[in-house]
Image (spheres, rainbow, N blue to C red):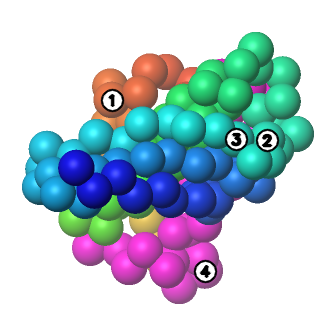
Amino acid sequence: MAIQETRWRPDTCTCLLVYEWDSLVTLTNRVHTFKRADVICPEHQSLLTELDAYTAALENNQRKNKTVNYVNTQLAIDPSSIIFSFSGMGNDRILNIEFTSAVVLTNLQKLGVQQWADTNFGVGKVIVQ
């Protein structure tokens, strides 16, 4: 075992979280294990434990990444043209997706992204604008 420690600040909040992983394990089999929260952002402070804050921050980040990846691969939109923000607190944070003025999507395209997000994350977890 070669345990490594990573300090992670997601781009979806200002938490600073620490997790461990074994560098001898292949990337596909690697597991990240929460160790501690050095900083819990205001949006996640209402959660009961540091692990709850880590879990919520990780889910927020993965939801954003999967949505950006879907828009990029399905609509060929460069990720730099996708603007994301979150509203809400704790486990009830909503991902808001907008596009720069360089991107013009039809209502049907926006509806397609919204339906994909509703199917994958639940209704109301992502709002496509």
Q: Which residue is mark 4?
A: 101
Q: Is residue 54 above or below residue 82?
A: above
Q: Is residue 94 left or right of 102 when viewed as pictured?
A: right
Closer to the chain start, of discs 3 and 1, is: 3
The amino acid on which the numbered mark 3 sits, given as a three-letter code, is Ala
Res. 84 visible in picture: no
The amino acid on which the numbered mark 4 sits, given as a three-letter code, is Ser
The amino acid on which the numbered mark 1 sits, given as a three-letter code, is Asn
Whether label 2 touches label 3, CB < 8 Å: yes
- The magenta stretch spans which residues? 76-102
Alpha-carbon span between mark 4 and mark 1: 27 Å
Q: Residue furthest right?
A: 42
Q: Which residue is painted at 48% across and 56% down in the image? A: 5
Q: Nearer the viewer, residue 96 or 1?
A: 1
Report the number of discs.
4
Closer to the chain start, of discs 2 and 4, is: 2
Res. 38 visible in picture: yes
Q: Which residue is mark 2?
A: 40
